[in-house]
């Protein structure tokens, strides 16, 4: 009654079928190699700090393992302590008691979302063009994707948690602007996109601070959100980025060898980085929080002044 589907291979003699199976295996291997080529085939180890066997062997295996174990253990302790101290439900109730509601979506928010998406889209295009898609896993690119989510997501509990975490994860943007690594950016406008993208990482939280509500930062004396962000960042670096970097020999966010612009260049650069990045994460995030307390009143004052002037002109 029903037509039975018959494979084309059934019409081929059994003595010749192995040829097609061999060809099928070759095609699957080709697809995998082609995909891996797009992911990190364009990473040139000739550029210092880019990757390669020498970069992967920059640290002795015993030193790399011991550093990783200690820092991962400290990060896990930080995350556990922070999660015990942070009460998201209580903080949401405090936000609800505060009569300053989150402003509705505006033209400015949509324009900022479009600008950020276009900037990141161009950066993704550069990564595909240079066959270095793997670099999209670096923290600054991940933070850009997080901020795109925050601009597109309506105000809610998830938005509050993610917003407070990413505020304390923007220290990488500061380092990228102060110590830029652009020796591998050779395409036209590729360097300019580097600076535009890292500058926009500051523009988004400042704009969301002004909206208030779930985008209101924690009190200045509350350090647990910063500690939680620090633990998550170091776990991401020493487990995921380092593991992937060792497999591919790609220096993801300088986990295999130091950057050419690293002032602490040497065999202990990661120990130095753990110290100064922990301090910078705590100070930098609180500096943005302090800034937020002045952003909203200043913006309101400027808007009120502009409205008064427009009324006087009328």
Image (tube, rainbow, N blue to C red):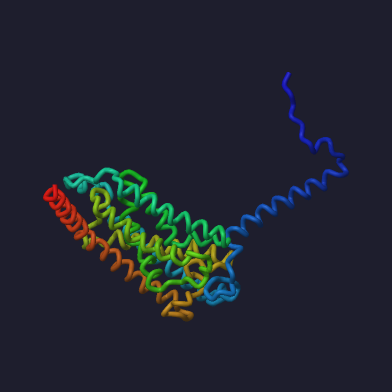
Q: Nearer the viewer, residue 81 or 225?
A: 225
116 horizontally vs 188: left or right = left
Residue at 30% in and 46% down:
107
Is 99 located above or below residue 84 in the figure? above
Q: Nearer the viewer, residue 313 or 260?
A: 313
Is 264 located above or below residue 113 in the figure? below
Residue 219 at x, y percent in the picture? 21, 58
Q: Nearer the viewer, residue 99 or 242?
A: 99
Residue 197 at x, y percent in the picture? 41, 61
Number of numbered discs overlaid on the protein picture:
0
The quarter in which the N terminus is drawn is top right
112 horizontally vs 286: left or right = right
Residue at 65% in and 56% down:
34
Residue at 39% in and 50% down:
114
Residue 232 at x, y percent in the picture? 39, 60
Given the current orientation, which residue lies at the most extreme left position?
312
Residue at 82% in and 46% down:
18
Give the image quarter of residue 281: bottom left
Is 27 located above or below residue 249 in the figure? above
Given the current orientation, which residue lies at the most extreme top position?
1
Is 181 located above or below residue 38 in the figure? below
85 horizontally vs 61: left or right = left
Q: Nearer the viewer, residue 10 or 226?
A: 10
Give the image quarter of residue 103: top left
Residue 173 at x, y percent in the picture? 38, 65
């Amino acid at each position: 009654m029903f037509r039975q589907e018959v494979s084309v291979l059934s019409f081929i003699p059994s003595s010749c079928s192995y040829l097609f199976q061999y060809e099928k295996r070759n095609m699957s291997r080709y697809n995998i190699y082609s995909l891996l080529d797009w992911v990190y085939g364009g990473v040139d180890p000739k550029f210092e700090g880019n990757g390669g066997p020498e970069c992967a062997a920059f640290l002795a295996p015993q030193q790399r393992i011991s550093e990783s174990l200690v820092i991962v253990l400290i990060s896990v302790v930080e995350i556990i302590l922070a999660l015990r101290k942070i009460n998201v439900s209580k903080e949401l109730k405090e936000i609800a008691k505060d009569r300053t509601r989150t402003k509705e979506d505006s033209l400015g928010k949509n324009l900022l979302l479009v600008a950020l998406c276009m900037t990141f889209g161009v950066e993704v295009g550069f990564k595909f063009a240079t066959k270095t898609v793997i670099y999209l896993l670096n923290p600054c690119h991940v933070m850009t994707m997080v901020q795109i989510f925050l601009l597109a997501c309506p105000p809610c509990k998830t938005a509050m948690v993610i917003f407070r975490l990413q505020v304390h994860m923007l220290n990488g943007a500061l380092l990228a602007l102060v110590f830029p690594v652009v020796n591998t950016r050779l395409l036209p406008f590729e360097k300019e996109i580097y600076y535009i993208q890292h500058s926009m990482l500051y523009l988004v939280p400042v704009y969301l601070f002004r909206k208030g509500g779930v985008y209101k930062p924690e009190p200045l004396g509350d350090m647990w959100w910063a500690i939680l962000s620090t633990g998550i960042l170091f776990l991401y670096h020493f487990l995921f980025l380092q593991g992937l970097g060792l497999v591919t020999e790609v220096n993801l966010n300088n986990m295999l060898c130091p950057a050419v612009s690293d002032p602490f260049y040497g065999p202990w650069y990661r120990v130095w980085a753990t110290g100064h990045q922990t301090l910078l994460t705590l100070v930098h995030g609180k500096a943005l929080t302090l800034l937020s307390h002045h952003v909203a009143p200043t913006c309101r004052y400027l808007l009120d002044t502009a409205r008064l002037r427009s009324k006087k002109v009328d």
